[in-house]
Image (cartoon, rainbow, N blue to C red):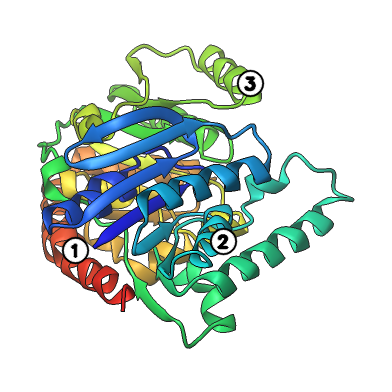
Amino acid sequence: MKVLFLTTAHRYNDDRIFYHQALELVKRGFDVKICSLSSDFEGTIDGIQIESYSVLDQSSKQKEDLFLKICNAFRPDSIICSEPLAVIAAGKYQKIKKSSIVYDITEWYPSFRMLQPYSWLLKPFHLIKFFLIQLYAGFLSTHFIFGEDSKKFPLMYWFPFKKKLTLPYYPDDIYIKKHIKQIEKNKITLCCTGRISKEDGIDNFFQTIDFARKKKPNLEISILIVGAPKRDSDVTHFNQLLEKYAWKNITIVKPTSFETFTSSYSDADICFDLREKNFEYNNSLPIKLFYYAASGKPVIYTNLKAIRKHIDVSKFGYLVEPENSELIADLIINYTENPSLYDKHAQNARVNYEKKYNWDLIKQTFVDFVKQSEK
């Protein structure tokens, strides 16, 4: 069976597409190809054919034509698409050769970042336009994969009889560096990873550390940041924060490859994500949470609805209101003064991952779903 992955926004070596789904299918004897429109590469990696181009600046028509050309050359039995544009191109190919179109929905469409460039007067118009495009992609699709329950709206409700699968973002253990630490009484390393911006919680992270330093001056706090700002405005804002909080022991590491991601924060005692609670974030399950747990790291996360619905974080950390810096500082200090609690949370993080949140538990369901999609 030939399976083609089409994606516009994701790179060809995306963790979900390449490292989990595509590699698993290759291991099971599938003929697999990935086409991305956000990065240049052509060749074969670990048995996966890749034809990828950096053409996001081209028109929708040009991108559709490129996808259609690749479909015609590869002749897939099943096409797994990550965005509406990929689904629309696959729909045109389906008129030539009957194949299944599996829409793998892991992102909000439209996302708030898609609407950011437009003025407040035009935002409602573009919101409706993107929503209708999403419905059209749902109409063309033959199957749905949902990354989480909250992403089922609106497609599952508009097309309730289409076959569907919920496939969470659980990690494969071969990509995990397990590093359970023992807390020191007056020394701690605090970490955040990913995109550095105000909405992603960098201000809340620094304000929390400021409170902890003032509450316990003899506590030696090291800061590990793995990531980078993307927008120019985020770069400026981050530099202003570094000037304002001119502390020692701040380590900033550029974004790493997926294979080395969990190694990049292995020295951390606690991993943070104090993102703002807008609608999209509140209803999205952060993927990194599973990786932190797999590494054996206690977490302090924004109290998001999606997390409460899927994961009992109280076993290995805390859900907090991100602006409540004084309370979060108390939680940090409490770990340093109660090493047995820290050890319990660190051990529980790994155990919960092993029992509930790892790729081995769901990979067969995914393979079976793709096999059945051909029928």
Disc 3 is placed on an element classified as: helix
Quadrant of the image containing the N terminus: bottom left
Q: Answer with mark 3 or mark 2, whichever residue precedes in sequence.
A: 2
Camera sees residue 71? yes
Residue 164 drawn at (x, y percent): 39, 77
Q: Is residue 278 above or below residue 212?
A: below
Residue, disc 1: 363
Q: Amino acid at mark 1?
A: Lys
Disc 1 is placed on an element classified as: helix
> Where is residue 119, by image quadrant?
top right
Nearer the observer: mark 3 or 2; the answer is 2
Nearer the observer: mark 1 or 2; the answer is 2
Residue, disc 3: 232
Residue 181 drawn at (x, y percent): 11, 36
* Lateral position of residue 15 relative to residue 231, left or right: left
> Where is residue 194, by image quadrant?
top left
Residue in view at x 31 percent, y 47 percent: 33
Camera sees residue 180? no
Q: Residue furthest bottom?
A: 161
The CA distance from mark 1 to mark 2 is 30 Å
The CA distance from mark 1 to mark 3 is 39 Å
Nearer the observer: mark 1 or 3; the answer is 1
Residue in view at x 24 percent, y 27 percent: 264
Q: Answer with mark 1 or mark 3, whichever residue precedes in sequence.
A: 3
Residue, disc 2: 92
